[in-house]
Image (cartoon, rainbow, N blue to C red):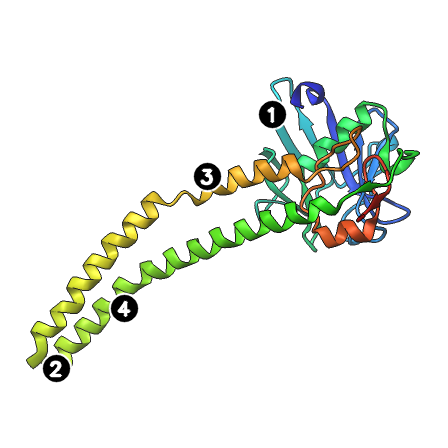
Amino acid sequence: MKDVLEGKTILIGKEPEKGRLLIGVKGMTKAITMGQIGSVPNSVSRCKPAEGIAHCQIEIDQAGNMTLTNMKAQNVTYVNDVEIMSKRIDATSTIMLGKDKFDINVMEILNAVQQILRGNSGGTGGTGNAGPYSIKHLKDTWDDYNGSIKKIRIRQRNIGLLASIPFSLTMIGGALIAFVPEIQSFAKIFTGVAAIVMLYGFYKRSTDKSIEEIEQLKDKFQDRYVCPNPKCHHYLGEWPYKILRQNKNCQYCKCQWTEE
């Protein structure tokens, strides 16, 4: 993907007329809109690719490195929840625009720009493709992915709770020694158990593969959660399945969807 995008400057902002996210490429008149009408808050500046106006831009150098920059000093942009004026980003960076922190997905932006470079303006004038295509299978893909992520989050939470147990046991043991000295030997049991739990917690944290598992799940999800039109097959981002049902068409190729 980056080979095609090298040397390009991507313009990002709010569509002036209908309030959707607008993606353009500097020096090109074609653009792509994303999301629902009125979905982008007023705190995001307008994007007019033909005039070089945007809330922010992503510059991609010849090595494929990406730098996100505010177009105006008064614009507000966050990268990984930290406000920036200009910062190096990658495909996994979390970007939010405006004081309302409107979230955008880097991979969706890059995919949209590919459509522009191929001459398909998608949301700003595409004529659509044959269909309808069934999206019924995407429900299982969505449910499997989110179910797996939830299990990992619960495991991470339990490991975190495990780490708090040694401190609690040590406090109990210390209180027993201070207020009931005659059972000092019994209180030492709490200290011993705390040491064992602490070691076990350290082992669980050191062997936890949650980060790697999440990355693998994301890769698999991005390969499967795509437009069913064989001529499109764009990754649909992390839009919930119920939103896909409501949209009833692909934001990239404009083909019609059905649940049959």
The label shown at residue 65 is 1
Residue at image mark 2: 180
Residue at image mark 3: 212
Mark 2 belongs to which amino acid? Val
Q: Nearer the viewer, mark 4 or mark 1?
A: 4
* Rendered view: 56 above or below 114: below
Question: How many angstroms separate mark 2 from mark 3 (CA)?
Answer: 48 Å
Q: Residue at x 88, y 28 (%)?
A: 29
Q: Which quadrant does the N terminus fall into?
A: top right
Q: Residues within 10 Å of mark 4 (few under 14, many from 20)?
A: some
Question: How many angstroms separate mark 2 from mark 4 (CA)?
Answer: 18 Å
Question: How many angstroms separate mark 3 from mark 4 (CA)?
Answer: 31 Å
- Label 3's element? helix
- Label 4's element? helix
Q: Earlier in the sequence, mark 1 or mark 2?
A: 1
Residue at image mark 4: 168
Q: Earlier in the sequence, mark 2 or mark 3?
A: 2
- Label 2's element? loop
Question: How many angstroms separate mark 1 from mark 2 (CA)?
Answer: 64 Å
Q: Residue at x 58, y 37 (%)?
A: 220
Viewer can see residue 85:
yes
Q: Nearer the viewer, mark 1 or mark 2?
A: 2
